[in-house]
Amino acid sequence: MKREDCIFCKLANGEIPANTIYEDEDFRVILDANPASEGHALILPKEHYANIYELDDTVASKVFPLARKLACVMTKTLGCDGFNILQNNGEVAGQTVFHFHMHLIPRYKKAPNNQGFLLWKERGLSPEEIGTICEKLTRQMQ
Ligand code: AMP
Ligand code: ZN
């Protein structure tokens, strides 16, 4: 389903022009309008899923092979030195557009904004606390 009020639905389906670098039946890949680096791109499914919790399994199974292919081609073409793949879910996690998307962010050794880029502070959990979380999650995955 597409949503009338969703800008990424419109971009993914070609209703609003975008800098498209790849398109197939399921996805459009565009350059981010406010890029974190040269070549920062977004994989957008053509159907609307607000986030990873809603994402269809078949679509999900196609996202990473596509991300891998793009990372290889973009690295070769742009000459970047590394690559981040990022996907935010929920406001607290930094999501600002509520249509599932995957960020492809080429990284350059010589970029001026490398300091602190995509870093988080360590939470400082004890081995016991980590163990408790591990048990809780393992139980649910069985
Ligand atoms: P997120 O914070 O993970 O939801 O990422 C949203 C991303 O979409 C940001 O990097 C924005 O710069 C980008 N963005 C928002 N609107 C547009 C647009 N019209 N065209 C291209 N990128 C966009
Ligand atoms: Zn949408």
Image (spheres, rainbow, N blue to C red):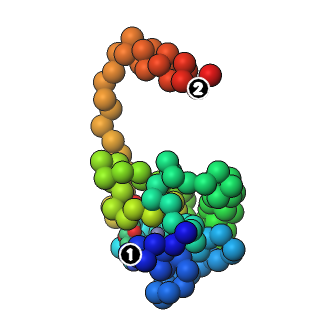
Q: What x and y, as percent, mark residue 35?
A: 40, 71
Q: Which mark is residue 65?
A: none
Residue located 55% across and 54% down the image = 55
Residue type at tag 2: Met
Quadrant that contains the N terminus? bottom right
Helix, strand or loop at mark 1:
loop
Quadrant that contains the C terminus? top right
- In the depicted structure, whether residue 42 falls above or below residue 83: below
Q: Nearer the viewer, mark 1 or mark 2?
A: 1
Q: What residue is disc 1 on?
A: 5
Q: What residue is disc 2 on?
A: 141
- In the depicted structure, whether residue 93 falls above or below residue 31: above
Q: What x and y, as percent, mark residue 16?
A: 46, 87
Residue located 67% across and 62% down the image = 66
Q: Is residue 116 left or right of residue 48?
A: left
Helix, strand or loop at mark 2:
helix
Q: Residues within 10 Å of mark 2 (few under 14, many from 20)?
A: few
Residue type at tag 1: Asp
- In the depicted structure, whether residue 122 falls above or below residue 102: above
The earlier-in-sequence mark between 1 and 2 is 1
Q: Residues within 10 Å of mark 1 (few under 14, many from 20)?
A: few
Q: What x and y, as percent, mark residue 140?
A: 54, 24
